Amino acid sequence: MNTFNNITTDRLIIRTLEMIDRDAFYKYRSMPEVYKYQSWKPENIGDSEAFILANMAVVPNTSDTWLQLAVCLKDGQLIGDIGIHFMDDGFQTEIGYTFAPDFQGKGYASEGVRAVIDYLFAGLGKHRITGSVDPDNMKSIRLLENLGFRQEAHFIKSYRMNDQWYDDCVYAVLADEWK
C-alpha cells in the first residue's frame, strides 16, 4: 500500500496531512496549551510546511516511520491530527493525537482515534498498539482508557524534552482485546 485511503466516520474525514492544512495546523500546534505535552512544536509557519512536506513522502506501513493524519470535519475543516508510528517489527504501532482546543471535549478525538485503531487492526493486521503519555495529561489518559487501553508501564524521568526530564506512561491494547 503506497497511499493512505481516507477514513470516514459519522462526523469526520481522516486523511493524510497535506499542504492545504499548513495554516490551521500551525495555528493550533503553536498554542502553549496544545504543545504542553508535545515533543514537537512549530516555531514558525515554515516549520509546519517542512513537517507536512516530509509527511507527504511517507509510505504508510513502512517500518520506523511516522505518518501524520489530518482529522477534518465533513466540511474539510482541520480540527486535529493523529500520528501513527509504524514499528520495526511490522506488527506493532504507536499512536499520538493532537486536537485544537475548540474541538476538545466533544468526542472528536475518541471518534478519530477509534477509526484509526480499526484501520490498524482490521486493515493492516497489527497485533499491538501503544500510546505514550505524560502522567499529568489526564485528558489523554482518559481517552486511552475509554478506548480500552491499559497502562503497562510508568517510567520515571525517562523522557527528555525542553531540557527537562519527564515521566512517561505507556498504554496498550492488543488486537484480540479490541472490540
Image (spheres, helix red, strand yellow):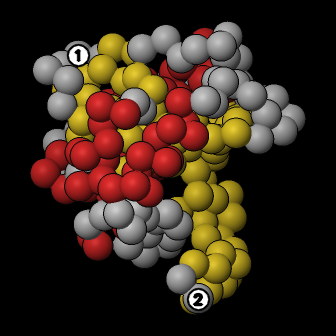
Q: Which residue is mark 1?
A: 10
Q: In the picture, residue 77 is in which quadrant?
A: top left
Figure check: 113 above or below 132: above
Q: Which residue is mark 2?
A: 163
Q: How many marks?
A: 2
Residue lying at 23% horizontally and 55% vertically, measured from the top left: 27
The secondary structure type at the circle numbered 2 is loop
Q: Is residue 174 left or right of residue 83?
A: right
Residue lying at 74% horizontally and 28% vertically, measured from the top left: 62
Residue lying at 30% horizontally and 20% vertically, measured from the top left: 13
* Residue 85 locus on image (x, y percent): 65, 41
Point out the frontmost of discs 1 and 2. 2
Q: Pick the quarter of the image with the N terminus.
A: top right
CA distance for labels 1 and 2: 42 Å
* Residue 78 locus on image (x, y percent): 24, 35
Mark 1 vs mark 2: which is more N-terminal?
A: 1
- Mark 1: give few (<14), some (14-19) or many (20+) Cα within 10 Å: few
The secondary structure type at the circle numbered 1 is loop
Q: Disc 2 residue type?
A: Asp
